[in-house]
Amino acid sequence: MAEDVKRSSLLVIDVQNDFCPGGALEVFGGDRIVPLVNRLSGRFPNVAATQDWHPPGHVSFASTHGTEPFRTIQVDGLDQFLWPDHCIPGSRGAEFHPGLDTRSFNLILRKGSKKGLDSYSAFFENDRTTSTGLEHYLKGLGIRSVYLCGLALDVCVYYTAMDAVALGFDTHLVQDASRGVDRPEGSLDQALGRMREAGVLFTSSERLL
Ligand SMILES: [Zn+2]
């Protein structure tokens, strides 16, 4: 492997049916990353995967507020961008993409399961104080570096990367094994720029495999 991935973890973010073509909140080309993620998973000493996991009536659903998706409202003083209903436990949409090889996943972490609180980052829910426990899991294993891939690049991958940097991890984005939703439009470029500024290192599956 071209880069040293000892003491590192591959974070596989939300590769679920609802974020793939045909899903409730599809990301263009979301399913195309699956073969790359599978190959990457086999190469890392640790793999932690996340699933977006929302009960019916979740705060992030436009339907909960009787309005249209893809707009921002205020809920309890927090900006909440509204999405179509997605990733409801028990639905096909919440399941991993059927082509995803989960055999090498050491941890499967489900986030956003509190009805009134959304979670984009794999480390903290959107109130920015409720930990998911991932930081302690990784640090408890002596892991210093994280490599991120998955969906959506400009939402959950982005927030996870920014938190990873802030928590002191060497943070790498495997860009070709991630895809963005770009809602609202322009958010993908903005997210990439902010990640670069924050010190996220950009890499590719080609360099890792
Ligand atoms: Zn969600």
Image: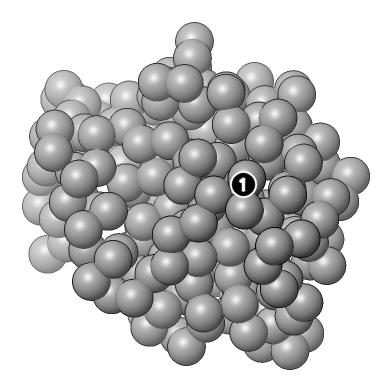
Q: Which residue is mark 1?
A: 205
Comparing 6 with 73, the one in front is 6
The total of numbered circles placed on residues is 1
Left or right: residue 105 compared with residue 201: right
Residue depicted at x 36% and y 56%: 158
Residue 197: tell me if it is visible: yes
Answer above or below: position of 25 versus 209.
Answer: above
Comparing 177 with 63, the one in front is 177
Mark 1 packing: few (<14 Cα in 10 Å), some, or many (20+)? some
Residue 53 falls in image quadrant? top right
Which residue extends farthest top? 22
Answer above or below: position of 186 versus 1.
Answer: above
Residue 163: tell me if it is visible: no
Left or right: residue 141 compared with residue 51: right
Left or right: residue 138 compared with residue 79: right
Residue depicted at x 27% and y 53%: 192
Quadrant including the N terminus:
bottom right
Name the amino acid type tagged 1. Ser
Left or right: residue 110 compared with residue 203: right
Residue depicted at x 21% and y 58%: 193
Answer above or below: position of 32 versus 131.
Answer: above
Which residue extends farthest front? 2
Residue 28 falls in image quadrant? top left
Comparing 20 with 70, the one in front is 20
